[in-house]
Structures are given as structure tokens and as C-alpha cells.
Amino acid sequence: MSPAPFRLAAVLAASALALSACGSDDSSGGSGGGEDSSDGGGGSSSGVTVGIKYDQPGLGLKEGDSYSGMDVDVAKAVVTELGMSEDDITWKESPSAQRETLLETGQVDMVFATYSITDERKQKVQFAGPYFVAGQSLLVTSDSDITGTDSLDGKLLCSVTGSTSAPKVKEEVPGVQLQEYGTYSECVSQLANGTIDAVTTDDAILAGFANQSQYQDQLQVVGDTFSEERYGVGLPKDSDQCEEINGIVEGLWEDGTMEQIIADNLGDNYEMNEELNPPEFGGDCG
Ligand code: GLU
């Protein structure tokens, strides 16, 4: 909702470094907003709108006025390192199919929403990070005979529109019957109801649902992962903060913050891929 103050803060920070080089005439960054930020310290008068998922336990979850999950904690850590405070964050729900548009239209300043870096998405947005690497897997009921992608023939699968998961499973299991919803929680409800046979997306997301108390004995993640999902910080194409955020993300891994965030949010039942984490940072800005 308030991208302008955030951009203004970025512009102010940049111009503080390069005052003499800055003319006063032109329109660096468009509207610029009307906020009179005179605190000079990146303080609480600036704000940042961060896109997250609202329905993915362990990753991005809204319960009343509280927000939790790995993406939420990474976002808070990055925003803090950028010189703002957690209180400066306005959270905005960013479903899979809307993330590029939300960034392109300035409705959010950053996206931390299990957002895989892909070449196609990079045509519209840029990505800092990655801060985590997950892999696509399957969630089934405890009594299911599905054990992996090779037992999906004739089964009804659910995934989400605008995700990498939907096209990937079609490629992996040609002819699979796939139903696409707007969110993973809708898929999981269908699975728990017995309307569909499996949900497919990133293992971290599936583990988050399986860990919920109401599903603990009912749902399980099965099979090997069959993709690499590099979670990036989605930024508008014209953001000048991508490299800075790369450095921040690397620092979060170096000082142990990331491991703590993962342990706090993804739970004992989730084993992250130790070969792919910490990720290789950088390379997706611009
Ligand atoms: N990480 C994948 C993606 O960005 C799947 C999860 C999601 O839809 O958020 O498409």
C-alpha cells in the first residue's frame, strides 16, 4: 500500500551518499510520495510493504494480527538490516499467481513468499538471494498408496495456479490429472476431505501443513524431491537494493540467523537439503 515512502527512503539514503552528484531538477523514482522524512536515520517514518503468503504454516501465516513463518522472519531480519524496524512493515497477502503483478504495480516493495527464482519471472521482477532452497514433493493421506511420482497414475492431484509446482508435475508425470486452486490451503482441505489424492508443491510448504496439529496423524510428505526451488526476495525491476539484500542474506547464513529461523519455523519433521543449503548467493539481480 505504501511503496512510495520506502522508495523515498531509498532515494534519500542514496542521495546522502552522493549529494553533490544529485541535481534537484528531475524525477528520480517517479511520484516520490509526500512524506516529509526529516529524521535522517531511516527511522520509523519510513515504511515498507512486504508481500507474504497468509495461509502457509511455517512459511507465511496470518493468524489474527500476528504473522509467522520462515518468510516472515527472514523479511523482518532483512528489513531490520536495511535500517528500518519491524514496525515499519505492512504485510500484504501475495498469492502465487499475483506476485509479479504486485511488484510491477508497486503494491508491494518486496516479496518473501516461497518465491522461486525463475528465468520467466526474472523478465518482470528481480530477485535477491536466494535465502533458501526447497524441492518439490508430494503430500498424501497417511493411508495412501502413493509413495512418489511413479505412483501417481490415475490419481487426482492438486496444486496452485501461477506456481512452478503445477507445470513441473505435468512435466514429471505426463497425463497427470491436475486440479489448480488459488492457494495451497485449499488443496490441503480437499486432500483432508478425500476429494483429491495428493497435493504437490515445495517440501517445506507441505511439511508445514503436515505439522499442523489437526493434520499430524492424517497427512504425510512422501517421495524424493523432484525440483530445486531457490527462494528469492522478489523486488521490482527498478529497485536498487538487490545487491545490498544479497549481502544481507549471505550475512544471515554466516552468523547463524538463518539456521535459527529454519529451526524455529520448519520443525523437527522437516529435513532441509543440506547439499543445497546454504544456497549460492547472488546472480539474479537486474
Ligand atoms: N516455490 C514455488 C513457486 O514459487 C511453489 C510455491 C509457491 O507457489 O509459492 O512457484
Image (cartoon, rainbow, N blue to C red):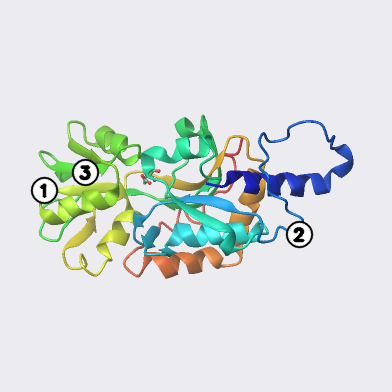
Rounded to the nearest angstrom, the CA distance separating label 2 from label 3 is: 50 Å
Label 2, residues with CA under 10 Å away: few <14, some 14-19, many ≥20:
few
Mark 1 or mark 3, which has the lower sequence index? 3
Would residue 111 be visible to someone looking at this image? yes
Amino acid tagged 1: Thr
In the picture provided, is 74 more to the left or to the right than 25?
A: left
Q: Give 246 or 51, whichever is nearer the viewer.
A: 51
**Is 222 rendered above or below residue 218?**
above
Residue 230: x and y in percent read 46, 46
In the picture provided, is 27 more to the left or to the right than 74?
A: right
Identify residue for label 1: 195
Who's the residue at 63% across and 56% down the image? 248
Identify residue for label 3: 158
Rounded to the nearest angstrom, the CA distance separating label 1 from label 3 is: 10 Å
Label 1, residues with CA under 10 Å away: few <14, some 14-19, many ≥20:
some
Amino acid tagged 3: Cys
Rounded to the nearest angstrom, the CA distance separating label 2 from label 1 is: 56 Å
Who's the residue at 49% across and 69% down the image? 260
**Is 238 rendered above or below residue 268?**
above
Q: Give 218 or 153, whichever is nearer the viewer.
A: 218
Identify residue for label 2: 39
Q: Give 198 or 91, whichever is nearer the viewer.
A: 91
Mark 2 or mark 3, which has the lower sequence index? 2
Of the residues tagged 2 and 1, which is closer to the observer?
Answer: 2
Of the residues tagged 2 and 3, which is closer to the observer?
Answer: 2
Residue 98: x and y in percent read 40, 39
Would residue 118 be visible to someone looking at this image? no
Amino acid tagged 2: Asp
Question: Quadrant location of residue 161?
Answer: top left
